[in-house]
Image: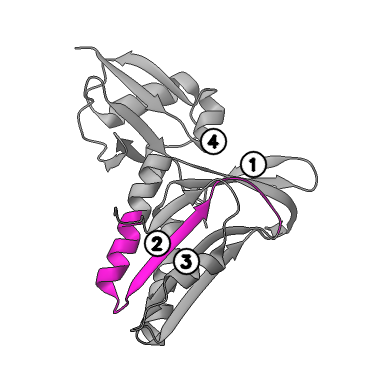
Amino acid sequence: MSRRVEVLYFAALRDASGVASERLDTQAADLAALYAELQARHRLPFPQRQLRVAVAGEFAHWGDPVRDGSTVAFIPPVSGG
Amino acid sequence: MAELPRFRLADAPFDAAGLQARLQDARAGACAGFEGRVRDHHDGRAVAGLRYEAYAELAEREGEAIVGDALKRFDIIDAACVHRVGDLAVGELAVWVGVSAAHRDAAFAACRWIIDEVKARVPIWKHERYAEGDAGWLHPGR
């Protein structure tokens, strides 16, 4: 089943994808599969293990299902402070 | 009156002394503050300036959770943190943490804990511009 999601990109991930966000239809069952799909499409420069993932502005788990209409963000290693 | 957020992002320079003054309390014998500033070098390279970008919604939620955790973990009265986003010059204030407590040990410890947690957990990224003209994102552990 295809689900429509919005994906947000930050920092080096945004540079790699070329966009701050995109809407797309995906068959990915969970967030890990969604990242694998987008990593291949945009040549995203991080293995999944270096990232965290968030859904609707809250940290989520890679095994969480991809929900139709959700906003997903991949969080590269942070460097505030 | 709605409670003020204890963590916020600032897209313009802010007044740390004024924020620190707001933490004053008759019960507080100690008020500790930390100022993180933009330094002119990184890994042996001259830094001309930097830009901070945040995932604002998540950063504010995570920052608020950190300060809230500090209020539970340490014997303190109040705490707050502000982090800049946008373009900063060398020497500019990038992040401020303030803590008030009855005694200094808890004030220092909580202040240190908050800045360490903010650096480790809050989705903010630093884009450094180098004196040689190039620039890049800092992604520790990459």
CA neighbours of label 1 inside 10 A, class few (<14), some (14 to 19), many (20+):
few
Q: Which residue is mark 3?
A: B97
Percent position (x, y) of residue B132? 80, 45
Establish if B11 lies above or below B83.
Answer: above
Q: Nearer the viewer, mark 4 or mark 2?
A: 2
Residue at 39% in and 77% down? B100
Q: Quadrant of residue A61?
A: top left
What amino acid is labelled 1 in the image?
A: Gly
Distance from the alpha carbon under mark 4 to that under mark 2: 22 Å
Q: Which residue is mark 1?
A: B136
Relative horizontal placement of residue B40, taking residue B125 as reference (left or right):
right
Q: Earlier in the sequence, mark 1 or mark 3?
A: 3
State the SS at label 1: strand
Q: Chain of mark 3?
A: B
What amino acid is labelled 3 in the image?
A: Val
Q: Nearer the viewer, mark 2 or mark 1?
A: 2
Q: Which residue is mark 2?
A: B117
Q: Nearer the viewer, mark 1 or mark 3?
A: 3
